[in-house]
Image (cartoon, helix red, strand yellow):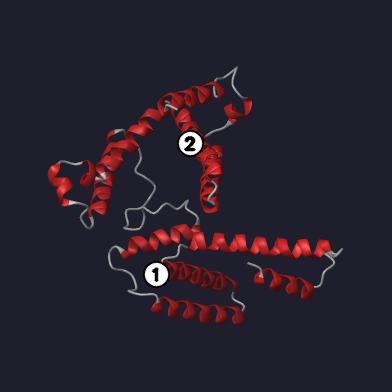
Amino acid sequence: MQPSRELSRLIEIMAALRTPGSGCPWDLEQDFSTIAPYTIEEAYEVSDAIDRGDMLDLRDELGDLLLQVVYHSRMAEEAGDFELGDVIEAITAKMIRRHPHVFGDAVARAAGSAKGQWDRIKADEKAARRRERLARGLAPEDRGSGFLDGVPVALPALVRALKLQQKAATVGFDWGEAAPVLDKIEEEIGELRAAIAAGRQDEIKDEFGDILFATVNLGRHLGVEAETALAGTNHKFLTRFHHVERRLTETGSSLDEASLDRMEQLWQDAKRRP
């Protein structure tokens, strides 16, 4: 299988789908904003296939994700902004630029990957991007100029919390171990209890958010990604709930008919199962 040939065919297919008069009516109606949710969904499905260790599904989901890149690139090409070749050229240049210890001259390769090198290269890239935007007469990026402003707002909240913490840690704004983070979580729980007792809904929301943020931080210090851990717990909950539902059906009952005590009994049974 030749990737270049197959990729060219995929580009042709997308162009045909977007051709007025002969293309697909649904595809012709789409724009960047309507396709963006599908792009996010496909990325999650790639992650799901990886979590399940299903290589057949992973192959298909990666194809779906690749289609999203081709789709956005085609719409940009129609608008005269850029095309898929520009996207590939940009990421190729970026990977080479960010790995001078692999692709650089003999001196750079011998030096290896120096501490802080990645951040310096990314800072240079941002400066170059600002100059390019000015040269093209484009408005500055909406992101602020603060140290943490480069962390995308569109990330899932748990993922963004981790990214913010990781970046802050690069300048020393971090606890050295997990123990004080546990203390922080207990402190936040106390503040949440006080907000609940006072019936202050806004404070309840804030304190609950603080607990989530601190929990993500604890996971980071323990080497556990909150998003991955929660996904695992979601799957565990689903599996156990399916057991409860199945056992009720086998005994001629249902979720609507069963008492909470009966469901709890079956839940504990599910927990004991391997």
Of the pair 21 and 8, the residue shown nearer to us: 8
Q: Is residue 210 visible?
A: yes
**To which residue does mark 2 refer?**
66
Q: Secondary structure at mark 2?
A: helix
Mark 2 and mark 1 lie on one chain; the one further toward the N terminus is 2
Asked if residue 82 shows in the view, the reply is no
Image coords of residue 120 (percent x, y): 23, 52
Residue at the (57%, 32%) spot, across then down: 30
Point 81% across, 72% down: residue: 259
> Label 2 crowding class (10 Å Cα cut-off): few <14, some 14-19, many 20+?
some
Q: Foreground residue, 171 or 260?
A: 260
Point 50% across, 55% down: residue:
156
Query: Residue 199, how many percent across, how many down?
Result: 62, 78
The x and y percentages for residue 227 are: 50, 60
Amino acid at circle 2: Leu
- Amino acid tagged 1: His
> Camera-side residue: 254 or 134?
254
